């Protein structure tokens, strides 16, 4: 049914005369305003039965949304967390997650679809034209606003009531601290855990691949060996936490090729021990260039010079690799002289 099939007296009255109005060009406005096209009535505007059908459709969508919300709550209560179902072609998935996703998605979709159908078929769609006008206030209004503000500030006494003003500012500054305190619930404070490892004086350097203590003869010139402290075992409950700070790179360089005097003194006959943990974001370093004595982090390509105190020569890392002071014990094995003298791994906000 179209508007041509409806008697003229049944058609809704036009609102205003903006539709189809055309302004003629003149000297001030050389381009004619084409105006708005004639308004076309929807079937719902001229047939109450069609409007009722749209109303029932919208109500049905909202009702389905309500039922989906009830199903969401029922699924959350009734479906066990560990139950799984097979859904083609996804495979086996959590029944609870699937039910919650479907019911909540359907509830939200039906609300949106109902609102859109309501707006497109039942709400007024008459176009309204409004002439543009300046949005700034007149000079008189601006002057009055400024005068009212100055008068209000004077009447409040904030300028001469210094005690009130200062205590108000103090209260407003202190209130956000309540939110800062709540950050304490994010977890226990790290204390000094980030500053220390399990390395200590007398701890032997153990080959991570063989599990055997290292002698100087076990480290060849140009080789790269990975080590961990004696007593650390993969069977330990906190092994992963400790190895993330304790892992070492053992490299042997001809003493004449070591650029840093400190590195030479902290090593033994050209054997140097550096932290394996990159100082950018904590990735393990494992790529070694034998000719240049450079090590490369595979994550973001930070490059360190092991012959020059582990200094950063490329990439986003912020500081050099920490070096561990080592020596040879009475039994002929390589051992640490102390813990690292600086925190290993990435920088953190408390780091001094």
Image: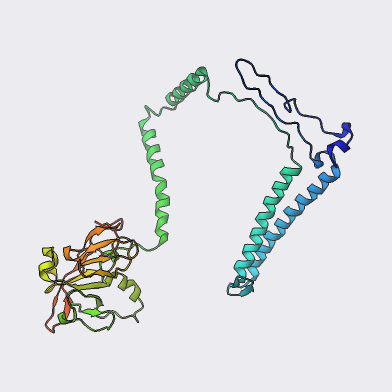
**Colouring convention used in this rendered image of the protein:** rainbow
Q: How many labels does the image show?
A: 0
Quarter occupied by the N terminus: top right
Residue nearer the viewer, 3 or 183: 3
Query: What's the residue at 73%, 54% (across, down)?
Result: 61
Whole-percent x and y of residue 101? Answer: 62, 63
Query: What's the residue at 67%, 58% (across, down)?
Result: 106
Left or right of 120? Residue 13 is: right
Whole-percent x and y of residue 352? Answer: 24, 56
Residue nearer the viewer, 242 or 272: 272
Q: Is residue 208 above or below residue 98?
A: below
Left or right of 8? Residue 95 is: left
Q: Can residue 89 be seen?
A: yes
Whole-percent x and y of residue 150? Answer: 44, 23
Query: What's the residue at 78%, 29% (across, down)?
Result: 14
Query: What's the residue at 42%, 45% (across, down)?
Result: 175
Left or right of 96? Residue 160 is: left
């Amino acid at each position: 049914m179209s508007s041509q099939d409806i008697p003229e007296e049944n058609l809704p009255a036009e609102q205003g005369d903006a539709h189809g109005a055309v302004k003629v060009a003149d000297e001030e406005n050389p381009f004619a305003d084409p105006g708005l096209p004639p308004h076309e009535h929807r079937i719902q505007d001229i047939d109450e039965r069609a409007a009722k059908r749209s109303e029932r459709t919208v109500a049905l969508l909202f009702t389905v949304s309500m039922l989906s919300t009830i199903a969401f709550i029922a699924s959350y209560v009734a479906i066990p967390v560990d139950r799984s179902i097979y859904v083609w072609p996804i495979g086996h998935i959590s029944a609870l997650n699937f039910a919650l996703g479907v019911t909540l998605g359907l509830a939200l979709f039906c609300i949106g679809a109902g609102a859109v159908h309501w707006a497109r078929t039942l709400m007024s769609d008459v176009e309204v034209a409004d002439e543009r006008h300046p949005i700034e206030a007149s000079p008189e209004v601006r002057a009055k606003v400024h005068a009212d503000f100055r008068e209000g500030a004077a009447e409040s006494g904030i300028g001469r009531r210094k005690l009130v003003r200062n205590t108000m500012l103090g209260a407003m500054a202190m209130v956000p601290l309540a939110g800062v305190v709540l950050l304490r619930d994010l977890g226990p404070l790290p204390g000094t855990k980030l500053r220390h490892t399990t390395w200590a004086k007398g701890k032997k350097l153990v080959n991570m691949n063989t599990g055997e203590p290292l002698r100087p003869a076990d480290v060849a010139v140009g080789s790269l060996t990975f080590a961990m402290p004696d007593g650390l075992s993969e069977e330990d409950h906190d092994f992963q936490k400790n190895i993330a700070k304790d892992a070492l790179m053992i490299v042997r360089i001809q003493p004449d090729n070591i650029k840093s005097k400190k590195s030479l003194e902290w090593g033994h006959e050209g054997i140097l021990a550096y932290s394996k943990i990159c100082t950018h974001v904590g990735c393990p370093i494992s790529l070694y260039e034998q000719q240049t004595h450079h090590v490369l982090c595979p994550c973001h390509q930070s490059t360190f010079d092991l012959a020059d105190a582990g200094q950063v020569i490329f990439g986003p890392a912020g500081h050099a690799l920490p070096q561990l002071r080592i020596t040879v014990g009475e039994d002929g094995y390589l051992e640490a002289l102390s813990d690292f003298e600086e925190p290993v791994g990435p920088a953190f906000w408390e780091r001094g």
